[in-house]
Image (tube, helix red, strand yellow):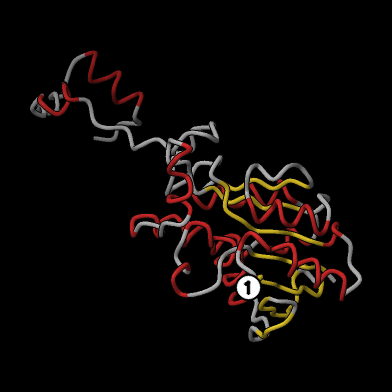
Amino acid sequence: MLLFAGLGNPGAKYADNRHNVGFMAADAIARRHSFSPWSKKFQGLIAEGTLAGEKIILIKPQTFMNLSGQSVGEALRFYKLDASALTVFYDEIDLAAGKVRVKVGGGSGGHNGIRSLDQHVGKDFRRVRIGVGHPGAKEIVHGHVLGDFAKSDREWLDVLLDTIADDAGLLVKGDDNSFMNRVTLALRDKLTPTGDDDRPPKAPKAQSHVRQARPQQPAAKLPETGPMAAMLKKLFGGKG
């Protein structure tokens, strides 16, 4: 048995916040794999199901983000699981929007939900960091994470959540690299990765203004006879 936790804040007011992308990931997994209906337990909402042949308990703490560890810690103790059985999905401002990174252990990176988990369950759990981008200045981080995803974000966010749900079984198997690769491949047509986690995705390359200003030239007429014509026929098999 394993415990998958999605972090967020309870209530409709916060439902579409960037800070709630962990809740969104948990919901996507539950829908895709026909988990049980959500029920109240451990100061949270839980749903049960199976991934890759392993029983999974999904939990969404309802303690508000800063006290997430209370809810998750209670669930781990009830099921007699240690931190190595825990995978946590949460928002990461130090990753560009749409990027996903998975690691075991590490620091909280200033994330209050992870700080609470570190205090209550230890640090040796798997962290699925879901990039929501950085607003550019420390003073506006709070408003950024507690702000809703923009409508334009849904184009990549829906693909991201679907891929997390589709490939969650790879996390069960401990194949974190394949999981990250699947997410990257699924999003490659939506985002142009920069390779720099702290920078936003590059915009599509604009057409050269020189090319835009230059009228399209008619195609050059190919010779029908002579040495040049013979060479072209030889190269292209005599097709006209």
Relative image position of residue 181 (x, y in whole percent): 63, 47
Q: Which residue is mark 1?
A: 62
Relative image position of residue 93 (x, y in whole percent): 53, 44
Residue at image x 73%, y 66%? 4
Q: Is residue 111 above or below residue 76?
A: above
Q: Is residue 95 left or right of residue 235?
A: right
Q: Secondary structure at mark 1?
A: loop
Q: Is residue 189 left or right of residue 185?
A: left
- Check the image and name the residue furthest to the right: 80
Q: Residues within 10 Å of mark 1 (few under 14, many from 20)?
A: many
The image quadrant of residue 35 is bottom right
Q: Is residue 178 left or right of residue 154?
A: right
Relative image position of residue 218 (x, y in whole percent): 10, 28
Q: Is residue 187 left or right of residue 167?
A: left
Residue nearest the viewer, comparing 144 with 227 = 144
Residue at image x 70%, y 49%? 178
Image quarter hosting the N terminus: bottom right
- Check the image and name the residue furthest to the top: 227
Residue at image x 36%, y 57%? 150
Q: Is residue 3 above or below residue 89?
A: below
Residue at image x 22%, y 20%? 229
* Amino acid type indicated by mark 1: Gln
Relative image position of residue 235 (x, y in whole percent): 36, 24
Image quarter hosting the C terminus: top left
Residue nearest the viewer, comparing 153 with 181 = 153
